[in-house]
Amino acid sequence: MVIMVDPASPVPPYEQVRSQIVALARDGHLSAGTRLPTVRQLAADLGLAVNTVARTYRELESAGLVETRGRHGTFVTHLAGGVPAEAERLAARYAEETRRLGLDPAQALGLVRAALGQPEPGLSARG
């Protein structure tokens, strides 16, 4: 996740960060379920006060674009990514079932790619 804060901008830093997270989610760079850095980590990375980033996360959460799951962290919601809630639920159920069956993540993703008609990364079809 690449976020830049322009200290010379008239836009407050919390709003710069908020709008960039929203844009990253809408563009698909932060998909639903992606865990965001902790408030402290992002503040340190950006050279901002912890309260500035905390405000950003509060604003995103009040808009329903992220959800905080206690000590587990803050995650992008389906609303931010434009993903239907049902698709998010189905993906979570698929992940749960593939773990139950003992598939590793690469196998589970390979099955999804095949179902979607997408080749494995690095492979190309030759005729």
Image: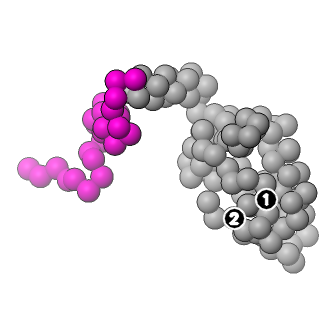
Q: Residues within 10 Å of mark 1 (few under 14, many from 20)?
A: some
**Residue located at (77% from left, 67% from top):** 44
- Left or right placement of residue 106 versus residue 66 in this view: left
SS under mark 2: loop
Q: Which residues are magenta?
A: 100-127
Callout count: 2
In this picture, is 56 found above or below 48?
above
> Is residue 113 among what the camera can see?
no
Compared to 57, does 115 lie above or below?
A: above
Instruction: Tell me the quarter of the picture where residue 112 sits.
Output: top left
Q: Nearer the viewer, residue 119 or 47?
A: 47
- The local secondary structure at tag 1 comes to helix
Identify the residue position indicated by label 1 in the image. 40
Residue at the spot 38% in from the left edge and 27% down from the top edge = 98
- Tell me the tag on residue 3: 2
- Left or right? Give the position of 3 relative to 8: left
Q: Which residue is the extreme one toward the left?
A: 127
- Residue sitting at x 22%, y 53%: 123
Report if residue 114 is visible in the image.
yes
Where's residue 9, x and y in %?
86, 72
